Amino acid sequence: MKIAILPGDGIGPEIVTEAVKVLQALDESFELELALVGGAAYEASGNPLPDDTLALAKHADAILFGAVGDWRYDKLERMFRPEQAILGLRTHLQLFANLRPAICYPELTSASSLKPEIISGLDILIVRELSGDIYFGQPRGLRNAPDGPFQGNHEGFDTMRYAEPEVRRIGHVAFQAARKRTKHVTSIDKANVLETSQLWRNVMIDLALEYPDVKLSHMYVDNAAMQLVKAPKAFDVVVTGNIFGDILSDEAAILTGSIGMLPSASINANNKGLYEPSHGSAPDIAGKSIANPLATILSAAMMLRYSLGRPEQADRIENAVKLVLSQRYRTLDIITPGCKQVSTSEMGNAVIAALAH
Ligand code: IPM
Ligand code: MG
């Protein structure tokens, strides 16, 4: 099993170090190979996604990714910015399905800004389409407006587009995931305004015929943003496009108390995947040993389950994380009175100790 380790920027290296420690404690036979990505790679080579990093990502069995981005690079031309690395990996590896679970651990209910009764027991799965939509749609660019009321003025434009097979394949992922859960898919779109969404909705309705055991609901994205904070437990699997999924998955993440707890998987048709915490690079707390490594450690568990075919090892990591929470170990982002505050590496060590139980 060869795993590409891409720590990236900000807190990326600190949190990935802990996940690597956990993987090594679990199984000494993993072959781990490190490469630069994002701002760190730009500094070293002038390219946020160097050829050797991409080659490693392509031939590894799975990728464990930290985070990319730092405001120091905000003024760079877009192609040199750290975010291009993750977008490039998604495109080159055709990672079209992004799974973002939002689970509220019982011990962390009070760390959420929402009332405990609204979020206790929350367990939803956001299935975000990751390789299409306005993120990648052509044409896009900056130009002088060729027409319209602002004709002749400088304008920016992007294209939202989805093809039927693209919607169908992400729909299958959502329906199949729902079958292993409480069998309810909510498809989120803006079909009252957008043609792309009308097509999306039609495809979902058609696909549902193949899954008569799964209930399909539809919701407009603006209402979904509201329902997610009002009654999040009404959702089971949420399926949506790239841009809506980007926004709603951050919203869902914070419901759970801390975005520092949430893993994610981005997979392609062959179950090859890139695994990363749902949070970003948090450059403001980088190097302070306070970042929460649990989302990355849980991402390693998802990697074992989805790409490496090792569900027992995934269970062991997930159980170890539950144990450290019940032992009251907390990083700063999830600290509540009566708990023990630990550093990034102390949290990693606590998980390793818990693996032995
Ligand atoms: C995410 C991030 C990325 C995205 C950025 C870093 C390009 O926000 O993974 O959600 O917009 O997809
Ligand atoms: Mg995002």
Image (cartoon, grey):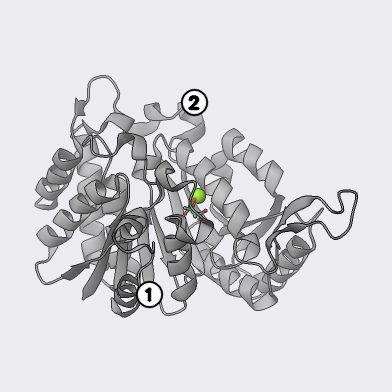
Given the image, on which type of amino acid does mark 2 rest?
Lys
Q: Mark 1 points at which residue?
A: 272
Q: Which residue is drawn at 22% across and 25% down?
A: 339
Tell me if 165 is positioned left or right of 268 in this view: right
**Tag 1 secondary structure:** loop
* Residue 141: % across, % down: 68, 61
* Residue 312: % across, % down: 23, 65
Residue 105 can be seen in this image? no
Given the image, on which type of amino acid does mark 1 rest?
Lys
Indicate if the residue with disc 1 has its beta carbon within 8 Å of ligand 1. Answer: no
Tell me if 76 is positioned left or right of 142 in this view: left
Indicate if the residue with disc 2 has its beta carbon within 8 Å of ligand 2. Answer: no
**Residue 164 shows which numbered tag?**
none
Quarter of the view holding residue 131 = bottom right
Quarter of the view holding residue 129 = bottom right
- Comparing 86 with 175, the one in front is 86
Q: How crowded is mark 2: few (under 14 residues within 10 Å), some or many (20 or more)?
A: few
Q: How crowded is mark 1: few (under 14 residues within 10 Å), some or many (20 or more)?
A: many
Q: Name the residue under label 2.
A: 115
